[in-house]
Image (spheres, coloured by chain):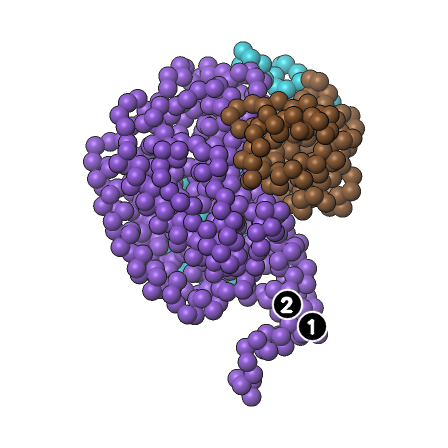
Chain colours: A purple, B brown, C cyan
Amino acid sequence: MLSSIPYTELRELARKDDCIQYELFFGPNFPGMHGNFGYILDVAGSTILRVRPNPGLLHRGFEKLMEQKLWFQNLSLIPRICVVDPDPNEVAYCGAIEKILGAEIPERAKFIRTITLEMSRMTSLLMGMGALGGMMGLYTVMYRMMDDREGLLSLFEWLTGARIYHIYNLPGGVRRDIPDGWTEKLEDVLKQLESNIVEWDRLMFENPVVQKRLSGIGPLTQEQAVNWGIGGPSLRATGFKADTRKDDPYAAYPYLDFEVPAVGGGDALARAVQVREEYILAISLIRQALKKLPEGPFKLDTGNPLKFIVPKGDAYNRVESSKGEYAYHVVSNGDLKPYRVSVRGPSLPGGLALCHEHLPGMLIDDVAIWMASLAICPPDFDR
Amino acid sequence: MTRNALVERIEAETGIESRPRYSNQIEASVPRERIISFLSFLKTIGFEHLSNITAIDWIQDSTMEVVYNVWSYSERIHITVKSPVPRGNPVSFTCMGLWPQGRVYEQELHEMFGISFQGNPTQGPLFLHNWKDIPPLRKDFDTEEYSRRAYGYLEEEQ
Amino acid sequence: MSDFIKVSRDEIMDGKMERVLDFFRARSMWMLYYCTGCGAIELPPSMTSAFDMERFGLGPMATPRQADILLITGYISVKTLKRVIRSYEQMPDPKWVVGFGSCPVNGGIYWNSYATINQLEKYLPVDISIAGCMPRPQAVLDMFQKLKNMIQRGEAVGYKKYKLNYDWYKKNQDEVLNREEPVFREDELFSAPPEQISGEKITAGGNR
């Protein structure tokens, strides 16, 4: 009887079923795929033999378009690179310009930037956890996380005017000041979100079915993660304590007091638990920043934005986003428009390079979970 | 190791002169033939994270510059390595053996700029579909005119 | 567009059976779950408990063979256009196309990009469009109400337009997807970067 064979042996039997070989398009038109991206797989039975990524479905030519617009006009294009977590992009671009100018933004602007960055990180982590739950078939997680996200998106709309693409950070500070009553509402939303964590634990993290499903998928050691260029929560889930907020600080992070969480383990279950730790850390960082928020101006005076010139030079600025390390290399020729802007997205090492190492030998059922746990999101390598 | 000690050590062992800049970064310019030995030397002294490989097209000077951005977790220092390549014959060498994700970055640079990397087997199209023109990120390509001719604008057709 | 055959309303209101079927079709529309661009981030809030779309009869569907609506959320690159046309032709009649956001209407913020198309109307028949970048979930629900009324009145007939004018659509699609010649000739490239510090732009082929 098939049911009396232990599960590990059954998996071995499925792996040996190589009598039928075919080409499978784990393609763009598929609910299990994040965004518009495709893998062309050579499959034998249920086991993958070879993978060819098929990127470029979301290619817009960002780096060329940014050379055609003025320095301030580019801020309308920049958040559209990453759709779930747009604020680190704005901070990276503005930080690179501030490095070339040698300018220091006011203290109040630094703290406001930190608060919006951490809020954006929370919305992105909620989306990531929801996607991971959806890939396993546990759709309740997706439904409830979207509901939590609505609280944060309404706060963003009150502060900046838009739910998703904020265009809030400028070279020199932020666009407008915090309105009255916003900080009290933020505190209420944080209390509500914190009390929901007990539900997530019962639903997902302490669920034995989820733990069994996620363990063992996509194992990474510390040396492998550093060599392949993986960063962010996926790197810290292997036990390697590295965080751009501590190593190369920007905004108000030097003034805040926190410990970087690093869960060991390296597989998909460790990455899911790491996401939970980062979520709790983000709530505590927002509370610290709200307590220490100083008075003062919220941006530098940069003059007429239509005649804003950045002196000749180049700079490389990195920030820590919820998926990994975003970095911008900005080159200026002393002109009204940038000469070259190059965007480094965190999903390129995972989605296009690490797939050749991890996917051969994996079953087709696990590919969607592998992608969701490494937070592979196609817009930032297609650009 | 402090930043100045690193600058001196790089100069002593490879002869390349590097300059510190911003608060925790170093910048160096390396000729094309010595770029791979320089990068493998950097990997031995603690620069183990390759962040980005990009290229800049200086059309007025007829050169292209391949730029490597490498970060060290242990020293917390960043280095930007620039290596110029002539525009008429843009050929360089691959760093796939040092960092495996370099293969994808170089494939993208080949498609967008036309720079070929010797030793890299995958130099075919990656993002673009059925592309017949010159590499699009070069400075002599006009994207607005291409969009008007290939796809048309709404106001002009009515 | 002089040879474009238009479909008028009188030709389609042919019989009471069609009206009864339209009444039911309008209340059970299944959309193809294919997120083609960045506009798709506002679909999970519309589908899930925040703005619940299922109470109107809308639900996601995995395969084109069982879907009614093709939702083009956002910009379309050339590679995506090939897949979207194939999915559209696999869907059985009646089927409707919705353009989501400003990018399918006139190119949106990527109007001058070499990789995205500017007007979806030239390649697929679009029944209704929502403007916005990106549209809010309330706008999505409003659009579905309008589409439901259009279907009930018998006005959403993009699929018949596609069949009657297939040659015109195919010619436009082939021009983009199966290009043979490069767009620029050798002598039309720049010799210097097109920007000057005064802000004056040099256009292709020298100053006109």
To the question of a shared chain for discs 2 and 1, the answer is: yes
To which residue does mark 1 refer?
Answer: A18
**Which chain is home to disc 1?**
A
Give the x, y percent position of residue B101.
65, 45
- Kind of residue at disc 1: Asp
User: Could you say whether the residue bearing mark 2 is in a helix, strand or loop?
Assistant: strand
Q: Is residue A107 left or right of residue B129?
A: left
> What is the spatial separation of the Cα atoms under label 2 and label 1, in whole angstroms?
8 Å
Give the x, y percent position of residue A321.
46, 42
x 58%, y 78%: residue: A10
x 61%, y 47%: residue: A228
x 58%, y 65%: residue: A364
Q: Nearer the viewer, residue A316 or A377?
A: A316
Which numbered circle lies on residue B58? Answer: none
Q: Could one spot residue A33 in this view of the protein?
A: no
First reached walking from the N terminus: tag 2 or tag 1: 1
Q: Quadrant of the N terminus of chain B?
A: top right
Count the labels in the image. 2
Question: Pointer 2 and pointer 1: residues touching (CB < 8 Å)?
Answer: yes
B119 w.r.t. B28: above or below = below
To which residue does mark 2 refer?
Answer: A47
A222 w.r.t. B37: above or below = below
User: Could you say whether the residue bearing mark 1 is in a helix, strand or loop?
Assistant: loop
Give the x, y percent position of residue C2.
55, 38
Q: Nearer the viewer, residue A315 or B125?
A: A315
Q: Please tell me in which quadrant of the rendered image residue B45 appears.
A: top right
**Which chain is home to disc 2?**
A
